[in-house]
Image: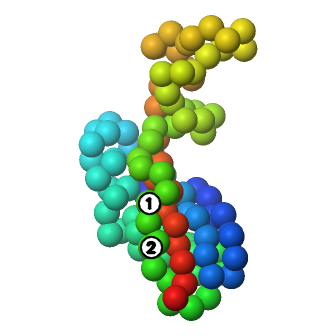
Amino acid sequence: MLEVIDVEVLTTSSCNVTIEDADIKDAVAAITRLQSADARNKALIAATTKGKVTGTVGVNGVLANPYPVNNEGKVVSFEMADADGKPLAPDAVQRQPVAYRIKYGITAR
């Protein structure tokens, strides 16, 4: 299910909207949903309602392609390390994705 996670207001005519899909049983399907028209429409609605962007809004681009996040909301990557700087094991809790996110740039015309 798609959910708006964050609306970063830049100006009265632009903002960045982050959308999350927590259904990761099928990563390909989650990524496809994040890139769908439904996700873009949710971003546009969030820009006008939560971001208070005025005017005719449109998606200006994808600022971050779909990426996995862990239960702390941090990006899951190969470079993840513990407090001592040692690489985390592949099965470490911090390296397990719980959702995928995408970030859209929204601009009013």
Left or right relative to 68: residue 14: right
Residue neighbourhood size for the residue with mark 2, other residues' Cα within 10 Å, grouped as few (<14), some (14–19), many (≥20):
some
Q: Please identify the quadrant where the N terminus is shown.
A: bottom left
Which quarter of the figure has residue 38? bottom left
Residue neighbourhood size for the residue with mark 1, other residues' Cα within 10 Å, grouped as few (<14), some (14–19), many (≥20):
some
The foreground one among 72 and 9 is 9
Q: What x and y, as percent, mark residue 31? A: 33, 48
The foreground one among 26 and 75 is 75
Which quarter of the figure has residue 85? top right
* Label 1 with label 2: CB-CB less than 8 Å: yes
Tag 2 residue: 59
Left or right relative to 99: residue 36: left
Tag 1 residue: 62
Three-letter code for the amino acid on which mark 2 is drawn: Val
Q: How many marks?
A: 2
- In the image, residue 55 sits, relative to residue 20, either above or below, namely below
Which quarter of the figure has residue 8? bottom right
SS assignment at label 1: strand
The foreground one among 105 and 82 is 105
The foreground one among 55 and 1 is 55
**Colouring scheme, one of rainbow, by chain, secondary structure, one colour:** rainbow
Alpha-carbon span between mark 1 and mark 2: 8 Å
Residue at 54% of width from left, 78% of height from top? 107
Residue at 55% of width from left, 12% of height from top? 88
Single out the residue that lies furthest toward the bottom.
Answer: 55
- In the image, residue 100 sits, relative to residue 43, either above or below, namely above
Residue at 44% of width from left, 66% of height from top? 61
Q: Would residue 101 be visible to someone looking at this image? A: yes
SS assignment at label 2: strand
- In the image, residue 107 sits, relative to residue 17, either above or below, namely below
Q: What x and y, as percent, mark residue 26? A: 28, 39
Residue at 68% of width from left, 70% of height from top? 10
